[in-house]
Amino acid sequence: MKVAKRVEDLPPYLFVEISKKKAAKRAEGVKLADFGIGDPDLPTPDHILNELHSAADDPSNHRYPESEGLPELRSAIAGWMKRRFDLDFDPETEILPLIGAKEGIAHIALCFIDPGDIALVPDPGYPVYSIGTMFAGGESYYLPLTAENNWLPDFSAIPQDICDRATMLWLNYPNNPTGAIATTDFFEEAAEFGRDNNLVVCHDNAYSDVAYDGYSPPAFLQVPGARDTGIEFFSFSKTWNMTGWRIAWACGNADVINALMRVKSNIDSGIPQAIQHMAIAALEGGDDWASKNNLILERRRDRVVDALQHIGLQVIKPKASLYVWARCPEGVSSADFSGRLLDDVGVVVTPGRGYGQYGENYVRLSLTTPDDELEEGVRRIADWTGSS
């Protein structure tokens, strides 16, 4: 049979390869301490699960949902955005529920990328930005994120001929994988750059409410002019420990939202309505739960950072996100370092090269490891003698 070239050219998804290596080690009888995937281990809150149980018994939720989501959910999202960021959105035209942020991120390239068009993509960055671009027939131009530029792209370094062909710009703060944050000054610069170059600016804000030490991440859409061409993605997965339920939303420019809705309505049948009711319960359930959740993650962050610094790695304690980003020892690649750590002490970390060329020489550790496993993992790291 003939396989489409887009599939032949598709690189293996990063975590599929990591899962294979973990399975091989477990088959050898190794008990792993896994800091790999950013999948919350803490359960979905009870008040959200209770709403699912109730909604599942309602026969009206057993039928096909609508692609644009329940009006009650869109209104609840608008209310949350108002409380959290003091932003007003029309629930009918400026908000669109998604089957997880990954789905929306992958599909939006189909709205604005034609063959030969360019998407401006951060490197290191979430692989789906570039994969969605490839599926749409476009090309990715990678924007280097480095420690020297505080993991922010330098728009002035983008050649004009690239800007002329670009139709989309991807941003992601708090950042995966680096844990970096952005200021509203940077978002203002990004919004201006987008307007000047007629770009759809897509900000992936999945970690908007996973933050520490009193820090509260801003939204891109808070800055003047951002909504002229901008859209922002938010996720229930990380804030409310709902990764398994697959629900998120996008909000922003009405024309961009409409284009994404039109693509989705031809590809999927929407989010199961019982899960939409869960999401409403999450949005309207108050902020106390998330604050307590973040305290657990903050304590884990401190333990991981201390262990990494103990073995001499350069690491900046992140103010937000689920990740710690650590520089490998001089002359050691991210694959070699993560491989040594797995082979020597059974600790799983993600090699930074999997997030792009500029992720080389770094590894990412997730804070979504159960406390007992995390404590065993940091002990193994702190005692490890093979880090150099």
Image (cartoon, rainbow, N blue to C red):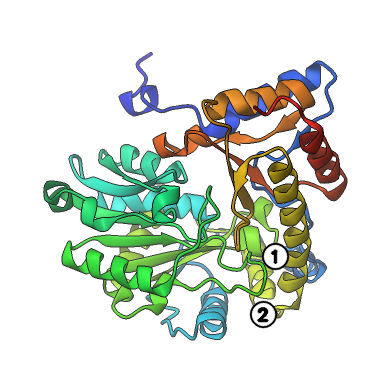
Inspect this view and state whether residue 109 appears: yes
Please state the horizontal and vertical placement of residue 137, each as a whole percent of the image. Answer: 26, 38
Q: Which mark is residue 336?
A: none
Q: Are marks 2 and 1 in contact (CB under 8 Å)?
A: no
Locate the C terminus and report the quarter of the image it occupies.
top right
Which residue is identified by label 2? 284
Q: Amino acid at mark 2?
A: Glu
Residue toward you, 128 or 3:
128
Q: Secondary structure at mark 1?
A: helix
Locate the N terminus and report the quarter of the image it occupies.
top left
Horizontal side of 80 relative to 202 (left or right) equals right
User: Quadrant of the rendered structure where residue 167 is?
Assistant: bottom left
Looking at the image, which residue is at 39% across and 50% down?
107
Horizontal side of 24 relative to 184 (left or right) equals right
Please state the horizontal and vertical placement of residue 224, each as a whole percent of the image. Answer: 32, 80
Residue toward you, 23 or 102:
23
C-alpha distance separating marks 2 and 1: 24 Å
User: Quadrant of the rendered structure where residue 210 is?
Assistant: bottom right
Q: Secondary structure at mark 2?
A: loop
Q: Is residue 117 above or below residue 108?
A: above
Q: How would you rate the neighbour count of disc 1 (Cα within 10 Å): few for under 14, some for 14-19, many for 20 or more?
A: few
Which residue is identified by label 1? 59
Q: How would you rate the neighbour count of disc 2 (Cα within 10 Å): few for under 14, some for 14-19, many for 20 or more?
A: few
Please state the horizontal and vertical placement of residue 341, each as a whole percent of the image. Answer: 70, 27
Q: Amino acid at mark 1?
A: Pro
Earlier residue among tags 2 and 1 = 1
Looking at the image, which residue is at 62% across and 49% down?
324
Please state the horizontal and vertical placement of residue 386, each as a whole percent of the image. Answer: 71, 24
Looking at the image, which residue is at 11% across and 47% down?
161
Q: Is residue 283 above or below residue 4?
A: below
Inspect this view and state whether residue 266 appears: no
